[in-house]
Amino acid sequence: MHAYRSHTCAELTKDNVGQTVRLSGWVHRVRDHGGLLFIDLRDHYGITQVMADADSPVFAQLEKLRSEWCIRIDGNVMARDESLVNDAIPTGAIEVFIRDLEVLGAADELPLMVFGDQEYPEETRLKYRYLDLRREKLQNNMKLRSDVVASMRKRMWDKEFREFQTPIITASSPEGARDFLVPSRLHPGRFYALPQAPQQFKQLIMVSGYDKYFQIAPCFRDEDPRADRSPTDFYQLDLEMSFVTQQDVFDTIQPVIQGVFEEFGGGRKVDSDWQQISYKDSALWYGTDKPDLRNPIKMQVVSEHFAGSGFAIFAKLLENAGTEVRAIPAPKGGSRKFCDRMNKFAQGEGLPGMGYIFWRKQSADSIAQEQGISVKEVNAKVKAGEIVLGNEAAGPLAKNIGPERTEAIRQQLGLEVGDAAFFLAGKAKAFESVAGRARTVIGEELGLTDMDRFAFAWIVDFPIYEKDEETGKIDFEHNPFSMPQGGMDALNGDPLNVLGYQYDLACNGYELVSGAIRNHKLDVMFKAFEIAGYGKEEVEKRFGALVNAFQFGAPPHGGCAAGIDRIVMLLANEANIREVIMFPMNQRAEDLMMAAPSEPLNEQLRDLHLRVIPQD
């Protein structure tokens, strides 16, 4: 028999009854029934119930066992009584009577329990991550992650891509985030950098004549942490292709991503019709460039209904150039209680509040006031059919702008009695993100968002440039290496109208994929950077490898990268990316388990010709 096990803790069934077996694993749970001990023995594959009574030669040893001791047992497989069968686990029809025991690793008192669903502070979980990882949810998450990566690899190979590895130690390259610098021992005062992405290398692979590249690539960025972003490193499915258009990239990556979500989505609906939405429309309709299309709410501009109206705050705002009023429809939100809740939400976002209108069935009181008759008379006329109760708009805004304007708003937004709308005004960039978050809250609170679905959309037509309102300077708003739509002709016009062949894939409110058709023409590249104030010499200095390579027959090429951590987070139905990373950093970019970052030894600093300057 094998030194440690003849079977895993998920293998034994009724077919094994009567056999002598050897199992190894961790003590998941101990139940003492007075002279009868039951132990749930757990390994990576599952759980088997093992037991012993006073007749077992190792009963006294078994009584000393505690949770998470690592043990080996020998015993006989027995069928459980029909009334005791546990259908929730594969081994639920049997149990093993223990004849022999070996303690492979005793455990001290545990800082967190593996059994059960207790919540522990993140600091504790990350410091003792090896214990946290034994828990069922994280075991499942890590298996899911591994399976997703394997599936991605297979799907890419099936599409005739080849996997190539790019350097981990390279030169610093501006990618929009801070680099992690690595000092050189052999070249004092000079530094390598960990790659923020394999961007330049994968483009150079295309220049080198390889038609299709992919890699499960580690990327390193010194970023502020968020729930959906690691502060140090992450993995992406990175790919690049030659002689392709934007649509070719979409057609290549959609079956890979869609297939992974269908395979591992747990039966949730996976949309196959991926819309293409312009960046401009996405910002207008959803307040973000990563919209959650499970939520059907679309925002609209309603400025015309407030211009010159009795609501002085909005009317005066609209006299300024570049301002607008935007409405967030709220079907089924037509109650003062809900409107007050959303007002409170806006105040929590730093705004004084949100204007609102809600539509309700017309009341006898309002008609009486309007016609100058008593409520009693109104009720009599309603009964006689002389007055028909319609609908009316309510709320402070409705009183200020009057019934004609509120009715025009209702019709534009397609709302009915029992619905509401919320309003934000000013320059779009100042309130857009708050409007987007309000849309999300409204969709979830009113039950409009389909939570059992993965909804995808390509966001396209990103502007390449933006203008600083204070200085008037033109700078890059998005990827400077995207091919401008229209090429050199577009760059000779108004920079703020230049769109790039850049694209993101949004799913359920998260950005999953980002990519572009690359600018492979040197004259167009130099012009693009010149508009943003970067001279030819600076471009050559910063991106010398690309500039040099593009002089020797660069093909048209493009690609994208899909965030693996974020994809697994969605598939695992987790709200925090640390739940799908095996050894994550905390929110302060610290590894509590390995005590990193740590202070270097003086000898290390001397080797690297470095000195640490004390902080004041």
Image: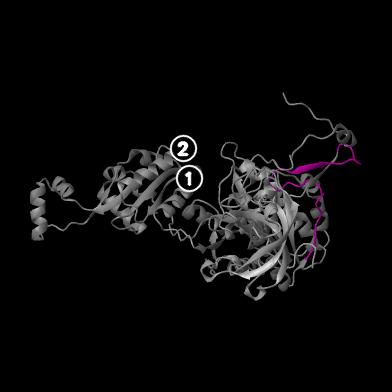
Residue occupying image coordinates x 76% and y 26%: 614
Look at the image and say whether residue 343 sits in the magenta stretch.
no
Of all residues shown, which one is farthest toward the right? 186
Q: What separation in Å lies between label 2 and label 1 (alpha carbons)? A: 9 Å
Q: Relative to 275, is 18 on the left or the right?
A: right
Of all residues shown, which one is farthest toward the bottom? 15
Q: What residue sits right under mark 2 in the picture?
A: 350
Q: Is residue 524 visible?
A: no
Say which element carries label 2: loop
Are there few (<14), some (14-19), or many (20+) residues within 10 Å of tag 1? some
Number of callouts: 2
Q: Are marks 2 and 1 in contact (CB under 8 Å)?
A: yes
Q: Relative to 232, is 400 on the left or the right?
A: left
Please tell me which of labels 2 and 1 falls first in the chain: 2
Residue occupying image coordinates x 68% and y 66%: 152
Q: Which residues are magenta?
A: 163-189
Question: Looking at this view, is 69 or 126 the one in front?
Answer: 69
Q: Is residue 141 visible?
A: yes
Q: What residue sits right under mark 1 in the picture?
A: 434
- By secondary structure, the bulk of the magenta-drawn segment is best described as loop
Quarter of the picture containing the C terminus is top right
The three-letter code of the residue at mark 1 reads: Val
Q: Relative to 419, is 173 on the left or the right?
A: right
